[in-house]
Image (spheres, grey):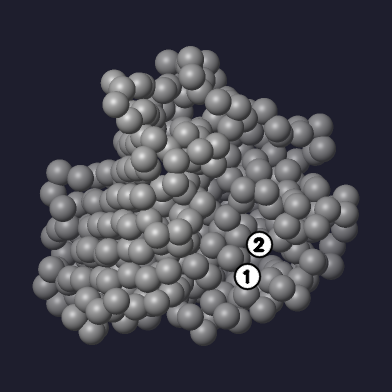
Amino acid sequence: MSGTNPNAGRIRLGMVGGGNDAFIGGVHRIASRIDDRFDLLAGALSSTPEKSRASGEALGLQRIYDDFQQMAASEAEIDDGIEAVSIVTPNHMHCAAAVEFLQRGIHVICDKPLTATLEDAQTLQAAVQKSDALFVLTHNYTGYPMIRQARAMVEAGELGDVRIVQVEYPQDWLTSSLENEGLKQAEWRTDPARSGAGGSVGDIGTHAHNLACFVTGLTVEKLAADLSCFGAGRTLDDNAHVMLRFSGGARGMLWSSQVAPGNENALKLRVYGPKGGLEWSQEDPNYLWFTPHGEPKRLITRAGSGSNDAAASVSRIPPGHPEGYLEGFATIYSEAADAIRAAQTGATAADAMGLLPGIEQGMAGMAFINACVSSSSQDAAWVNL
């Protein structure tokens, strides 16, 4: 991947959450190592000291802590303490953990959505603004090469002014009530105390919302949402239909679902303007379809003929070899490493962050979730963000 600086030395990394059997913790660990930019040295990996120690020992960590408070205080005091921390807990713990590290000048890389509640989000936003440390939110789909290609094409005016944005993220894994069968991931994601006010709209709808805004450069100004709970006994939505009105006059629709049999991780984006349209699918991420108005469809492939510098800057291997989810996640980590090194040499947070999602994107995601919940409670009334 171009743009990385491996000679700067690996960044000393810690992790909060992500212990044994936690899917997303493993993803973050792999992503942090793909471009050889981080060393994972310390962690408070689970909700109990015993589980944390077992997970830390399995990973060979140098320093294992009972909880994130102990970890933040200790790491800030030692000479070779961590420079950054990954927070991969359920949503309700993001705020408290992030604030502990930000207050001590330790950079934070946090899983999405930002927090479980708007109040926590505002607390975290204030902590980010007061801290010299960076805050990175892992909206990993923005790291795919062909998404960077699409963003650059829209920015260059190849579609003209965006008119229509269609984005969807259907899954099927909660079609049956797995939360009642002991599956940890289903248990916390369907629990409003740990997940927050949004179910599918918070878990995957925020990804779809963020991706649409990232590629088009537009913001959602108003929405009308119809949220449904099809799973028996659920209080959080498992399906969402959302109409969107963007800045600049563009119109859009967003669908997120975790009860759509036959869909695994079928994130798709379509963007249309008077000059042409773009289509991209996460399950086939190395392809971007571009249709200039009145002309045949054109297939642009990652690192192939027609791909641009924006895509090349986050590509790692020759064309025809698939890059996907882990590499897209790794792009966020490698750009976070660049941002951390830049900040350490005096760059402002705005200059260091570049295209990385941060607190602003996190707050936009929280506003999106809350607007969807509010709209649905008013029978899909239009709600301003």
Q: Which callout, 2 or 1, points to the residue nearer the camera?
A: 2
- Assign the N terminus to one quadrant of the image: top right
The answer to which of 120 and 288 lies nearer the viewer is 288
363 vs 246, left or right, is right
Could you tell which of marks 2 and 1 lies nearer the N-terminus? Answer: 1
62 vs 204, left or right, is right
Which disc is residue 197 wearing?
Answer: none
Q: Are marks 2 and 1 in contact (CB under 8 Å)?
A: yes
Circle 2: residue type: Phe
Which image quadrant for residue 67? bottom right
> Which residue does the numbered mark 2 point to in the structure image?
135
In the depicted structure, whether residue 369 falls above or below residue 352: below
Please name the residue shown 33% across and 30% down the image. 293
> Quick one: SS at disc 2?
strand
Q: Residues within 10 Å of mark 1 (few under 14, many from 20)?
A: many
- Is residue 243 among the parts visible in the rendering? yes
Which image quadrant for residue 265? top left
Please name the residue shown 82% across and 37% down the image. 8
> In the image, residue 43 lies at what x, y percent?
62, 59
> Quick one: SS at disc 1?
helix
Please name the residue shown 24% across and 51% down the image. 170
372 vs 380, left or right, is right
> Which residue does the numbered mark 1 point to in the structure image?
98
In the depicted structure, whether residue 282 falls above or below residue 368: above
